[in-house]
Image (cartoon, grey):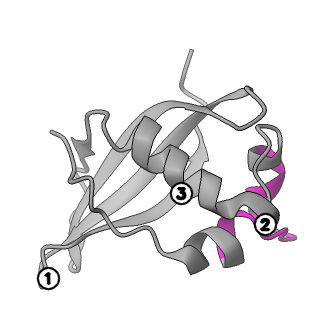
């Protein structure tokens, strides 16, 4: 299944979570390998939309009271040309039917 191209990717999700250094569960260091930072967060949004969102999404088996949760796995090519294997999580909300980006992780099962 393909998720809609107009999915919501919240700016705060990128700038205040994924690209912000954290003591626990830090993803900014992982994304920095491919050239992503606070200074070019818009590029991360563009690349998620153009490289990951068009790929097939798999519906999660785990129920969620807020919506249907999907996973998209793929290779994200950063602005410096480095390829990252990522697993992204998206949700189609029951109430609004809007598709929202939730998070991403390094895909340890890839390749």
> Residue 23 colored magenta?
yes
Q: Is 19 situated above or below 34?
A: below
Q: From where the camera sits, is residue 25 visible?
A: yes
Q: Residue at x 78, y 57 (%)?
A: 28
Query: Mark 2 Cα within 10 Å, few/some/many (few <14, many 20+)?
Result: some
Along the line of sight, the residue nearer the viewer: 68 or 18: 18
Q: Is 68 situated above or below 80?
A: below
Quarter of the image with the C terminus in it = top right
Q: Mark 2 or mark 3: name the one nearer the start of the chain.
A: 2
| Callouts 3 and 1 close, C-beta under 8 Å | no
Query: Disc 3 to disc 1, how far (Cα)?
Result: 22 Å
Q: Name the residue under label 1.
A: 96
Q: From where the camera sits, is residue 26 visible?
A: no
Counting from the top left corner in percent of width and height, residue 39 is at 80, 64
| Callouts 1 and 2 close, C-beta under 8 Å | no
Q: Is 81 situated above or below 98?
A: above
Q: Mark 2 points at which residue?
A: 38
Q: Which residue is drawn at 61% across and 61% down?
A: 42
Q: What element carries label 2?
A: helix
* Span shown in magenta: 17-30
Q: Name the residue under label 3.
A: 45
> Residue 71 colored magenta?
no
Counting from the top left corner in percent of width and height, residue 44 is at 61, 53
Quarter of the image with the N terminus in it = top left
Q: Nearer the viewer, mark 1 or mark 2?
A: 2
Q: Nearer the viewer, mark 3 or mark 1?
A: 3
Q: Residue at x 54, y 26 (%)?
A: 109
Q: What element carries label 3?
A: helix
Query: Mark 3 Cα within 10 Å, few/some/many (few <14, many 20+)?
Result: some
Along the line of sight, the residue nearer the viewer: 1 or 49: 49
């Amino acid at each position: 299944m393909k998720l809609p191209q107009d999915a919501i990717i919240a700016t705060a999700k990128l700038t205040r979570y994924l690209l912000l250094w954290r003591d626990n569960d830090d993803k900014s260091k992982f994304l920095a390998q491919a050239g992503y930072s606070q200074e070019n967060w818009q590029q991360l949004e563009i690349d998620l939309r153009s490289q990951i969102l068009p790929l097939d999404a798999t519906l999660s088996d785990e129920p969620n009271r807020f919506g249907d949760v999907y996973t998209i796995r793929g290779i994200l090519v950063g602005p410096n040309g480095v390829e990252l294997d990522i697993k992204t999580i998206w949700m189609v909300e029951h109430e609004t039917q809007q598709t929202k980006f939730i998070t991403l992780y390094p895909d340890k099962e890839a390749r």
